[in-house]
Image: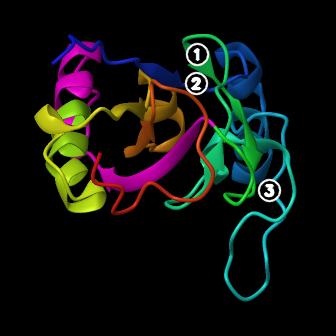
């Protein structure tokens, strides 16, 4: 089996702390910290993304399909309907616990362990036997402290290239 590296991207609060400190009202703070992109357009019944576009990283959900976002720090992601070719899919979300940010290494370890535990139930094959890979979107210290962000989004991808449809039950 070829060695795989985990691609780690961080969810980031995009407003400067000095600006945030001078604002009043949670809505204004949330709007600044959440990024400049909007909620993706979703089907009213299924909640599936129906139109390609950029979405706030805090708006992605399990089952959403995306194309690769560039950079280590991400505030918005290019989403697409899953029936179109795409690079990645959110396959699981979970929440980290604790009041104080445990540090980057601890967050990455907890995130990777949590995503790994859900890989086989989603794909139908153990990670070690699969050709697929994953990485977590994780909170940063800033999003943890300023937004109470504790959510890890597990993202699966195929190193061989784009896929069409979900990777749920792919078993490869």
What secondary structure is marked by label 3? loop
The reply to whether discs 2 and 1 touch (Cβ–Cβ < 8 Å) is: yes
The numbered dot on residue 12 is 2
Spatial separation of the CA atoms under disc 1 and disc 3: 20 Å
Q: Could you say which is closer to the camera, residue 119 or residue 167?
A: 167
Q: Is residue 94 magenta?
A: yes
| Of labels 2 and 1, the one closer to you | 1
Residue 12: where, in percent of width, then height?
58, 24
Residue under the image location 71 percent in, 27 percent down? 20
Occupied quadrant, residue 19: top right
| Residue 63 appears left or right of 57 | left
Q: Is residue 27 left or right of residue 139?
A: right
The residue closer to the viewer here, 3 or 65, is: 3
Q: Which residue: 12% across, 32% down? A: 128
Q: Which residue is mark 1?
A: 73
Residue at x-position 22% and y-position 59%: 124
């Amino acid at each position: 089996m070829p060695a795989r590296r985990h691609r780690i991207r961080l969810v980031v609060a995009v407003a400067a702390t000095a600006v945030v400190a001078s604002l009043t009202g949670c809505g204004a703070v949330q709007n600044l910290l959440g990024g400049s992109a909007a909620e993706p357009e979703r089907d009213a019944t299924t909640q599936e993304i129906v139109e390609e576009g950029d979405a706030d990283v805090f708006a992605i959900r399990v089952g959403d399909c995306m194309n690769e976002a560039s950079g280590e720090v991400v505030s918005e992601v290019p989403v697409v309907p899953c029936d179109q070719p795409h690079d990645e899919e959110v396959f699981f979300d979970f929440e980290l616990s604790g009041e104080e940010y445990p540090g980057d290494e601890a967050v990455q370890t907890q995130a990777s362990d949590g995503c790994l535990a859900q890989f086989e139930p989603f794909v139908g094959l153990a990670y070690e036997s699969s050709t697929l890979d994953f990485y977590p979107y994780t909170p940063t210290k800033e999003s943890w402290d300023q937004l109470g962000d504790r959510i890890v989004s597990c993202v699966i991808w195929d190193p061989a290239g784009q896929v069409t449809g979900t990777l749920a039950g792919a078993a490869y």
